[in-house]
Structures are given as structure tokens and as C-alpha cells.
Image (cartoon, rainbow, N blue to C red):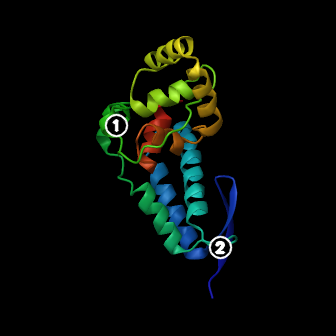
Amino acid sequence: MKKVIEVSIGGINFTVEDDAYFRLKEYLKRFEETIPDKQEAREVMEDVEARVAEIFQKEMKFPNQVVDMGLVQVVIDHLGEMEPASQEHTTQGSSSFYSGEESDYTKGERKFYRDVDEKMLAGVCSGIAAYTDVDVTIIRIVFVALAFAYGTAIFAYFLIWIIAPRAESVAQKLQLRGYAPTAENIRRYTSQHK
């Protein structure tokens, strides 16, 4: 018989086995300690906890399932192990560690969402631009030109607006750009887009 704990992760309540809770807590604490700025750490940890809750919900087979060590290990595998911040990173502040270059991100599966952060109307054009790595201005010009030339672009725009989901979570924003929603990528993205 194992002891269980009721916890709120990312605003969602879960029942977690005692040993799994302490393993997850220790993992999140180690990750938080790699972020030198405490204000930034709080914001990043909110996003990471939301991603943890999302993974738990996806992996749970039935409602009210107790989170065990196996599920916690799935989360750690998805988010990746943390490397401790070296002295070089903490002394340079926002150096190459926080540079935001594409080579810093771990690549992942690309999924299409509407990009509501860069939207003019509904985020369709900015979502297409982020998904295809094309300048959003070019995509908007193409939509306007097609709207005047054929008129079907207006229908297509509204259809995409209705069908495509919004990129609301940091994990979705990363997937839109082709990056894996790992803890390190969440930290980099959050530090760049404050």
C-alpha cells in the first residue's frame, strides 16, 4: 500500500504517489535552480508546470488515475534532464545561453496553429509564416493579392480561422516553430518572449 498526495500542477489537480511526487518535485527544483533570475524562474516554472500537466493528462489512461513513478518518468523523458548552469552562463547574463539562436533549440515535430501573438486579425497569416519560416509580410501580401484576384483567399482565411487551433501554451508555440516542447526550450522561449 502506497501513500498518495493531492497536488495542483499547472492549475489541475492530480493524485500522485508519494515517491513519484518527491521525484517530480526534485526534478522541477533542479530545473528552477538552473535559472539565475528569480522573476524569470517563476514565469518559466509556470509554463513548465503547465506542460507537465498536459503530459499527465495525455498519458493517463482513465480518469482519476494515480500518477506513479512511470508517469513521472514519462514527463522527465519528454522534458529532458537539466544540465546545471555553469559559471560561464551565470556571469555572462544573456549570452549565448539565452541568445535564442535557432541552433540552441531542440528540434521537434512541427504542428500548425494560429499565432495569436503576432496576429493582425486572427493569427492565420502569422501562423502560416511561423510554420513555413517565411516572413509574415510576404504571407499577408499573398493573401491580399489572392483575395483581390480570385476572392477564394477570403474563404480560405476564414476556413483556416475556424479549423486551426490557437497557439496558446508555450508548448504549442514551440511546436508551431518546429521545436520540441522540452523544459530547456520552454525556458529559452519564455526568456525571449517576455
Amino acid at pointer 2:
Gln
Dot 2 crowding, Cα within 10 Å, few <14, some 14–19, many 20+? few
How packed mark 1 is, by other alpha carbons closer than 10 Å (few <14, some 14-19, many 20 or more), is some
Residue 72: x, y in percent?
51, 67
Give the residue pinned by disc 2.
65
Q: Amino acid at mark 1?
A: Phe
- Image quadrant holding the C terminus, namely top right
Q: Nearer the viewer, mark 2 or mark 1?
A: 2
As measured in the structure, the alpha-carbon distance from the residue carrying label 2 to the one carrying label 1 is 38 Å
- Mark 2 element type: loop
Measured from the top left, where is residue 68 in percent x and y?
56, 74
Instruction: Determine the residue positioned at 56% across, 37% down.
Output: 39
Rendered image quadrant of residue 151? top right
Residue 18, position in %: x, y?
60, 75
Check if mark 2's residue and mark 1's residue have beta carbons within 8 Å: no
**Quadrant where the N terminus lies?**
bottom right
Which residue is drawn at the image coordinates 69% and 70% (left, top)? 63
Q: How many marks?
A: 2
Q: Earlier in the sequence, mark 2 or mark 1?
A: 2
Residue at 36% across / 38% down in the picture? Answer: 90
Q: Can residue 193 be spotted in the picture?
A: no
The residue at which mark 1 appears reads as: 97
Q: Residue at image x 43%, y 43%? A: 110
In the figure, is residue 25 to the left or right of 189? right
Q: For mark 1, give the secondary structure.
A: helix
Depth order, front residue of 88/162: 162
Position above or below: 26 against 166 = below
Q: Nearer the viewer, residue 163 or 70?
A: 163
Q: Is residue 70 visible?
A: yes
Q: Give residue 191's position: percent from left, percent from top.
A: 47, 34
Q: Which mark is residue 156?
A: none
